[in-house]
C-alpha cells in the first residue's frame, strides 16, 4: 500500500514540473503553451507573475517527492505533510485551470484515499 501511494505521489510531483518548465520557458510543449494568464485565462499576471507561479509548481513537485520519501520510509510526519501538499497542489491546479484540471481530481483522490485509509485502519 505504501509503495503504491509513494509512486502516485512521485508521479504527481513529476507532473507538477510541467508548470515550472513551461512558465520558465525551459521547454516548449504543444499541449501546454506558454501564457501569462491564470484562472481560466481571466487574470493576466504577466511574465514575472507566471514565473512566480512556476516556482510554486516547482515547490509542489519537490514537496510531493519529499512526501513520497516520507511514505516509503514510514516517517511519522508523512500523513499530515501529504495532506498539506495535496491541498497546496489542489489550489495551484485551480489557479492553473483548465490546463491543470486533471491535477484537481488527482489531489481530491489522494486526500480521499488518505481519509478513507485512515478510517479503515490501512494508514497510521
Image (cartoon, rainbow, N blue to C red):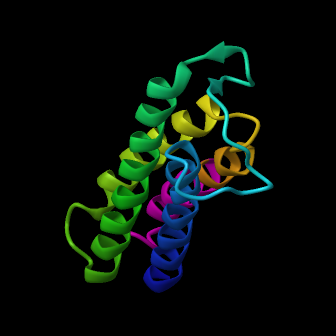
Magenta stretch encompasses residue 64: no
Q: 49 or 106, which lies in front?
A: 49
Where does the image place residue 35, in percent across and percent down from the top left? 67, 33
Tell me the quarter of the picture where residue 18 sits. bottom right
Where does the image place residue 87, in percent across and percent down from the top left? 47, 41
**Relative to 35, residue 67 above or below:** below
> Looking at the image, which residue is at 25% across and 81% down?
73
State the residue lying farthest toward the top: 43
Q: Is residue 98 visible?
A: yes
Count all numbered tags in the image, as a single digit.
0
Q: 65 or 122, which lies in front?
A: 65
> Looking at the image, which residue is at 65% across and 50% down?
103
In the rendered view, does 101 fall on the left or right side of 2? Answer: right
Magenta stretch encompasses residue 113: yes
> Looking at the image, which residue is at 49% across and 50% down?
20
Quarter placement of the C terminus: bottom left
The kind of secondary structure the magenta stretch mainly shows is helix
Q: 55 or 63, which lies in front?
A: 55
In the rendered view, does 24 fall on the left or right side of 103? Answer: left
> Looking at the image, which residue is at 60% across and 29% down?
95
State the residue lying farthest toward the right: 31
**Relative to 44, residue 6 above or below:** below
Q: Is residue 124 visible?
A: no
Where does the image place residue 64, in percent across and percent down from the top left? 40, 61
Region rendered in magenta: 108-124
Where does the image place residue 101, in percent across and percent down from the top left? 73, 43
Tell me the quarter of the picture where residue 110 sits. bottom right
Amino acid at each position: 500500500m505504501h509503495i503504491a501511494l509513494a509512486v502516485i505521489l512521485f508521479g504527481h510531483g513529476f507532473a507538477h514540473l510541467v508548470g515550472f518548465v513551461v512558465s520558465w520557458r525551459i521547454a516548449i510543449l504543444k499541449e501546454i503553451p506558454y501564457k501569462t494568464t491564470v484562472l481560466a485565462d481571466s487574470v493576466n499576471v504577466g511574465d514575472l507573475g507566471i514565473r512566480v507561479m512556476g516556482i510554486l509548481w516547482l515547490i509542489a513537485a519537490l514537496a510531493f517527492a519529499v512526501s513520497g520519501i516520507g511514505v516509503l520510509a514510514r516517517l511519522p510526519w508523512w500523513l499530515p505533510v501529504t495532506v498539506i501538499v495535496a491541498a497546496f497542489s489542489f489550489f495551484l491546479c485551480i489557479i492553473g485551470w483548465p490546463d491543470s484540471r486533471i491535477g484537481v481530481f488527482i489531489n481530491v483522490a489522494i486526500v480521499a484515499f488518505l481519509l478513507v485509509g485512515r478510517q479503515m485502519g490501512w494508514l497510521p
